[in-house]
């Protein structure tokens, strides 16, 4: 396992189409979800949940995505429809992070949404720690009510994103990161 600071310094996103099998085992998936659930959660509301897509379920969900795409794009080619059908099958495992933020007397919805984002980020770090690669993305279908209904996302819920997980097909190359001088200011005299 990587040293914690080195782990944090080296995490990067890998495109879903560059993630290959084998994906995490059942025990590793449980570890990933356990870690993802250990995030700041003001009021202990658990304002997020997870949907796991593995095996054939990725294509079953993809059929729903393809149907919604086809309904909106009457002139779509078979290749375009097949591309949409494969959206959740590009990586061996996909975990959706669902935000369940809701009005609360003491806890602002914004804090609850941030907690869902923290769950997704913790999931990414856990994936990296286990030696896999991942990409956290949404894409159009994360906002399409027909798709969300079919995936079991309630009308009061929002999709924080899909985390695609697998083994990097090749060693990942890092991208330029912002210099601290560009993004850090110091308050005061």
Image (cartoon, grey):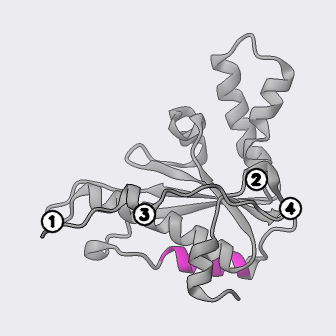
Q: Identify which residue, 189 or 160, lies in the foreground.
A: 189
| Among the two numbered marks 4 and 2 on one chain, the one whose residue lies closer to the N terminus | 2
Label located before the other in sequence (3 or 1):
1
Instruction: For label 2, count other residues whose C-alpha is less than 10 Å away and answer few (under 14), some (14-19) or many (20+).
Output: some
Q: Which is more toward the observer, 81 or 133?
A: 133
Kindly check if marks 3 and 1 are in contact, taking CB atoms under 8 A apart as contact.
Answer: no
Q: CA distance from mark 3 to mark 1?
A: 35 Å
In the drawing, what numbered circle is on residue 57? 2
Q: Residue 8: give x, y in percent of width and height.
A: 56, 76
Binning the other alpha carbons within 10 Å of mark 1 as few (below 14), some (14 to 19) or many (20 upward) gives few
Q: Main secondary structure of the magenta part?
A: helix
Q: Label 3 vs label 2: CA separation? A: 42 Å
Say which residue label 4 marks: 170
Element under label 4? loop
- In this rendering, the answer to whether 68 lies above or below 160 is above
Q: CA distance from mark 1 to mark 2?
A: 38 Å
- Left or right: where does residue 170 sit relative to residue 185? right
**In terms of secondary structure, where does tag 3 sit?**
helix
Kindly check if marks 1 and 2 are in contact, taking CB atoms under 8 A apart as contact: no
From the image, state whether disc 3 or disc 2 is nearer to you.
3
Q: Earlier in the sequence, mark 4 or mark 1?
A: 1
Q: Which residue is mark 3?
A: 180
Q: Check contact, mark 4 vs mark 2: CB within 8 A.
A: no
Q: Name the residue located 60 percent from the left edge and 55 percent from the top edge.
A: 176
Disc 4 versus disc 1: distance between alpha carbons?
A: 47 Å
- Name the residue carrying label 1: 106
Of helix, strand and loop, which one carries label 2? helix
Tell me residue 112's x, y (percent).
32, 61
In this rendering, is residue 32 above or below 77? below
Q: Which residue is farthest top?
A: 75
In the rendering, at what x and y percent does residue 109 appear? 26, 55
Q: Earlier in the sequence, mark 3 or mark 2?
A: 2
């Amino acid at each position: 396992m990587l040293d914690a600071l080195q782990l944090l310094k080296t995490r990067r996103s890998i495109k879903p189409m560059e993630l290959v099998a084998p994906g995490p085992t059942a025990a590793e998936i449980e570890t990933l979800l356990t870690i993802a659930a250990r995030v700041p959660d003001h009021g202990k509301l658990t304002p997020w949940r997870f949907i796991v897509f593995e095996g054939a379920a990725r294509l079953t969900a993809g059929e729903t995505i393809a149907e919604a795409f086809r309904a909106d794009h009457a002139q779509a080619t078979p290749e375009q429809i097949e591309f949409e059908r494969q959206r959740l099958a590009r990586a061996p495992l996909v975990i959706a992070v669902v935000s369940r933020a809701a009005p609360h007397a003491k806890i602002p919805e914004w804090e609850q949404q941030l907690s869902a984002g923290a769950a997704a980020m913790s999931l990414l770090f856990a994936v990296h720690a286990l030696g896999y690669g991942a990409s956290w993305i949404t894409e159009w279908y994360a906002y399409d009510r027909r798709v969300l209904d079919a995936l079991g996302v309630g009308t009061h819920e929002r999709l924080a994103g899909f985390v695609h997980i697998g083994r990097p097909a090749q060693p990942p190359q890092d991208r330029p990161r912002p210099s601290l001088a560009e993004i850090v200011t110091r308050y005061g005299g």
